[in-house]
Image (cartoon, rainbow, N blue to C red):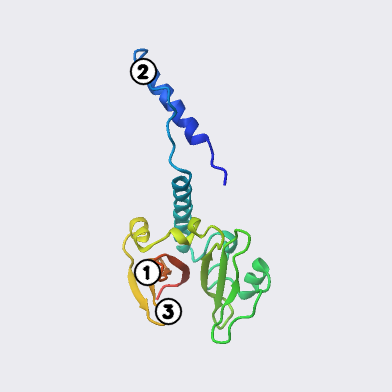
Amino acid sequence: MMLSKKPAARMVSSVILTGSLLGAGASFTAEPVEAASTMDSASAIAKEHALTTLHEIYNKAFSGEMPYTAMGLKINENTQNDVYETFGSPPEPSNTDETFDYYHAEMGHPGFAFAYNDDKTISQIRYFGTNVERDHNLGSITPKVLGKQLGSADEIRHISSTNEINYIYKTGNYELQFIVGEDRTVDHINLLQAK
């Protein structure tokens, strides 16, 4: 992965500017400034991407939508046919005990699933994130990050059948459910009509 050299250039520029502001008598060491290790930089970039994803999902939830490929598909408004026009037919049929159409994450595109009301309008949208570089997406979102970024959850439920924890945030007429797995990161996010 190539990292941009712009932050280092900005740092050098600010050192030069600071030196000129301090006057001609200021002296600086000629040794280069050591940057954070590549691993630390990659981790920071991953967390920043995850936070951007979190805020995009949270903000779109107030209109009953998810961002990215699912943009424009709204809870209780758009239909299964609208989903098919956007995503195509689902690559695999829905499970008999569930009413979801699943679209797997591919080539950096996030995965989604859609459930429907009896009238075939969307009742729920699930966001699975990306499989590649998961830490750039849901893999860097923990309950601590949720609390720091979105505040306390409106409700927290334990899902005994899967040993997951559901952190629920009300977003106007809708709610976001952050499903946290045993690894203490968000496994997927559900968007549905608020109860």
Front-lying residue, 37 or 7: 37
Q: Residue furthest left?
A: 152
In the picture, measured across the screen, residue 51 lies left or right of residue 118, that is: left
**Are the residues at dot 3 and dot 2 in contact (C-beta closer than 8 Å)?**
no
Q: For mark 1, what is the residue?
A: 167
In the rendered image of this protein, does residue 130 appear above or below residue 46?
below
Q: Quadrant of the C terminus?
A: bottom left
Mark 3 vs mark 2: in front? 2
Q: Nearer the viewer, mark 1 or mark 3?
A: 3
Q: Which residue is mark 2?
A: 27
What residue sits right under mark 3 in the picture?
162
Q: Given the image, on which type of amino acid does mark 2 rest?
A: Ser
Residue drawn at the location 55% of the way across and 63% of the way down: 131
Q: Which amino acid type is marked by label 1?
A: Tyr
Question: Which corner quadrant of the image does residue 161 belong to?
Answer: bottom left
Q: Residue at x 62, y 70 (%)?
A: 83
Classify mark 2: helix, strand or loop.
Answer: loop
Whichever of callouts 1 and 3 sits on the residue coming sooner in the sequence is: 3
* Residue that sits furthest to the top in the current view: 24
Q: Is label 3 in a helix, a strand or a loop? A: loop
Where residue 184 sits, quadrant-wise, is bottom left
